[in-house]
Amino acid sequence: MFKKFFVPVVAFVVLASGAWDRGNLPDYRARRARLVAATGDGVIVLFGAAENPAASSVTTFHQNEAFYYLTGWREPNAMLMLVPKSGAPGAAAIERDILYVPAPDPAQERWTGPRLMPDAPDAAAIAGVGSVHRAGLFSSELQQAIADSPKIYTELTPQAESGEETLVADTVAKLKALAPLAELQDIRPSIETMRAIKSPAEIALIRHAAQNSIEGHLAIMKALRPGMWEYELAALMNYETMRRGSEWPAYPPIVGSGVFSTVLHYDRNDRQMADGDLVVVDAAGSYSGYASDVTRTLPVNGRFTPRQREIYESVRGAQAAAIAAAKPGVTLRSGPNSLHQIALDYMNAHGHDRQGRPLGQYFIHGLGHSVGLNVHDPMDLEMPLAAGMIVTIEPGLYLPDESLGVRIEDMILITPTGAEVLTSALPSAPDDIERLMRR
């Protein structure tokens, strides 16, 4: 009896103290309190991602992002219930915050590893919540929680680019079956507003992810030679980031050379790179769930041609102009004074295509996006920037008739007075790139 109990507990402690960094547990409690304050008139229920035996053979488990944002909990099949104290909304007071986890299954844990035991004395402290209950109690405790106020806030709409459509549909179906008379309200807008501003702990994790990615790009610059295959660079990036603690790529690597440098989300990565090509390397790693996003455009033979350098300098100058203007209050994408317009105006004023026309028409995507738990973290890109936001600045020019595509992407942190480039340690000046590649 003692032996069966002792082994999983020791294993769990080892598991919980591994490389994954959850940041500061008080941050999660503060987020839950802010969310309750924003609603206050109903119970908040979120479902974590379910374990998928079929998918586990080809990919690692990824937690639902909103659930992780409020809990920092990585194990599958968990649920969260937040019950506000009775009284007027806006009091920012939680009566109960309960994490529900599956009951122990020693046979299954021999295959998937030890899990938190809900009855363990320190379960709540480990999870960073008020209490941890067995999942089997969720139904009855939900009925008690909504007895006086039959309103449930939950995810009714999936996050874009998250693949969470099935999770959201299952959540709605379960809650309608358990509480058919309850009013369901979408909690996503409130969570996404909160996620736009990063906490100091989140910023630290994103810095770590960015540094790992910088090291990967530096390795690529030193290794790149004519005759290499695009997939070699993708593999090198994954190796360099993961050996530094990145648990997975932040997104599928984009390594496009020659004419494929003009294809925005090219992901075949199966071309052999030739002397004279440019290659766009858009690749980065995550760290403890937080993404980074970095792009550099490199001459495969280590030397930019005059025409490649001309287009490259137009893109680089546009990026520099946008970063110099970044500060709280400006917009990223829309408006005559937006960072996008600043970049576009620069490219139109610096360089031409073969027909002598301005280059701006070849800038065919947005200037940037938010980065956080998702590489395209949810954020209203029309809203003014604010201190604590982390966004990319990634202008690009794509001229298919010249097999010439250039994109330069860096991550910036909006500060109270301007912006800090989180990826500034990675060279982008063409002379610096050529020098590094010669070494």
Image (cartoon, rainbow, N blue to C red):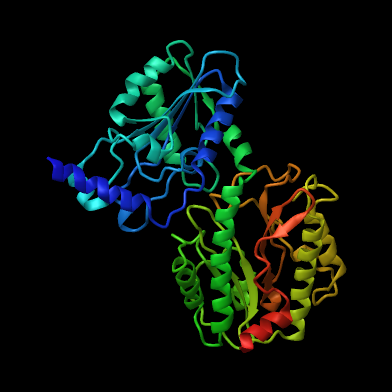
Classify 416 as above or below 139: below
The answer to whether residue 266 is visible is no
The residue lying at 35 percent from left, 43 percent from top is: 76
Image location (x, y in percent) of residue 402: 70, 78
The answer to whether residue 87 is visible is yes
| Image-based side of 392 in relation to 164, left or right | right
Q: How many marks?
A: 0
The residue lying at 37 percent from left, 27 percent from top is: 174
Image location (x, y in percent) of residue 173: 39, 28
The quadrant where residue 145 appears: top left
Of residues 229 and 26, which is closer to you in this image?
A: 26
- Farthest residue, direction left: 1
Q: Quadrant of the C terminus?
A: bottom right
Q: Quadrant of the N terminus?
A: top left
Classify 314 as above or below 329: below
Image location (x, y in percent) of residue 312: 74, 75
- Farthest residue, direction right: 349
Image location (x, y in percent) of residue 250: 51, 59
